[in-house]
Image (cartoon, rainbow, N blue to C red):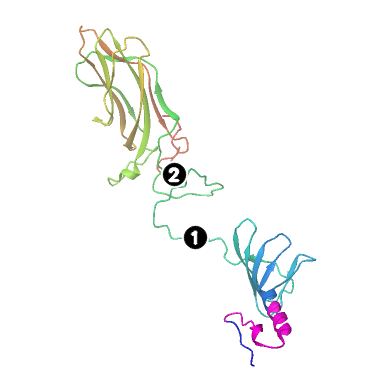
Amino acid sequence: MADTYTDNLGLTKISRRKGWQEAYNGNMETLGKMFCVDNDGNMWFVHNAIYDPDTDTWSQTNTAIASTATKMAVDGSFSFLMCAAGNSAITWVDAIPAPLLSEQVIDADKDWNQKSITNLNQMSANFMKAVTGDTSRKVYNNAVSTTSLTYVLVRSIPVPLDYVPAVFDNDKNKSSTFKVSFNLYSSGGGYSCGKIYVNGVAKSAEYYTATLTAPGTTYTVDIPGVHGGDTIELWMQNHTKSNSSDAAVNTYFEIFSSDSVVLGVIGSNASPTW
């Protein structure tokens, strides 16, 4: 009876022939040229490559063509490897090299997950953005107060033009977020009330306390949407005071941002503090 063969590998179906030993050995030769387990336990699927376990080396069966392999490591990882033609002793290299950044198409924002970009020669960008953080940019420890029953400006801190960009095309993603901490207490009576403003517009909730002794109560709030040239402001009032001399008092005011950003418009160098 004529031999019949399996698909793909073309192995002889030995149960259909009388001289099955030869067919079996031929099948093993075919499989042995395609599959291998090296001395470290890694499994290989190869083309045009023979492994020598005694020397732990590879050689090309036919040096006229390239050798290729898929390595399935004991740790579960996969590698796709190759060796160019003309190498009787094989040195495997990655068949899929790491992509060059210059070949990538950047079509969306990327979250770097707090990873660093190191050894950078030069950067060209439209702006640098500061995000909220714990590096102090400006701090005041002097006392300011008001006896006003309505909100009035008591502190105004300009953001340097070169710290964050001044032109944004109404794109809030091109602004910066700063963290502001401040204290409040009441001198005499009533409620000491405070809000954080930017350019005369309220940007925080109202904070208030009836505490009569310093340092009173300290509040911390993130203020987004801040641009170069804006002013970060503290407005206060004394509410429900019983005497005309009762005042809302502030003795601590501090602005923070990320310590990872000290540049604003590219080409300038803004000081880490204001």
For the record, the magenta segment spans: 7-29
Q: Position of residue 255 (x, y in %)?
A: 39, 28
Among the two numbered marks 2 and 1 on one chain, the one whose residue lies closer to the N terminus: 1
| Residue at (71, 75) in percent of width and height | 60
Residue in front for this viewpoint, 131 or 112: 112
Where does the image place residue 69, in percent across and percent down from the top left? 63, 69
Q: Secondary structure beneath disc 1?
A: helix
Residue 21 on the magenta span:
yes
Question: Quarter holding the C terminus?
Answer: top left
Whether residue 222 sits left or right of residue 33 in the image: it is: left
Q: Amino acid at mark 2?
A: Gly
**Quadrant into which the N terminus falls:** bottom right
Nearer the observer, 94 or 234: 94
**Residue 165 shown left or right of residue 86 in the figure:** left
What is the C-alpha distance between the residues marked 2 and 1? Answer: 24 Å
Identify the element where label 2 is drawn.
loop
Quadrant in the picture for residue 197: top left
Q: Residue at x 56, y 60 (%)?
A: 98
What x and y, as percent, mark residue 240? Answer: 20, 13
x 39%, y 54%: residue: 108
Mark 1 surroundings within 10 Å by alpha-carbon count, few (fewer than 14), some (14 through 19), many (20 or more):
few
Q: Is residue 160 visible?
A: no
Q: Which mark is residue 267?
A: 2
**In the rendered image, the vertical position of residue 118 relative to residue 196, given as above or below:** below
Q: Residue at x 65, y 58 (%)?
A: 74
Q: Give the vertical position of 115 relative to 34 (above or below).
A: above
Q: Nearer the viewer, residue 200 or 40?
A: 40
| Residue furthest right as drawn | 54
- Image location of residue 84, percent across then percent down: 66, 73
Q: Which residue is mark 1?
A: 102
Does the rendering let one see residue 35?
Answer: yes
Q: Which amino acid type is shown beneath numbered disc 1?
A: Ser
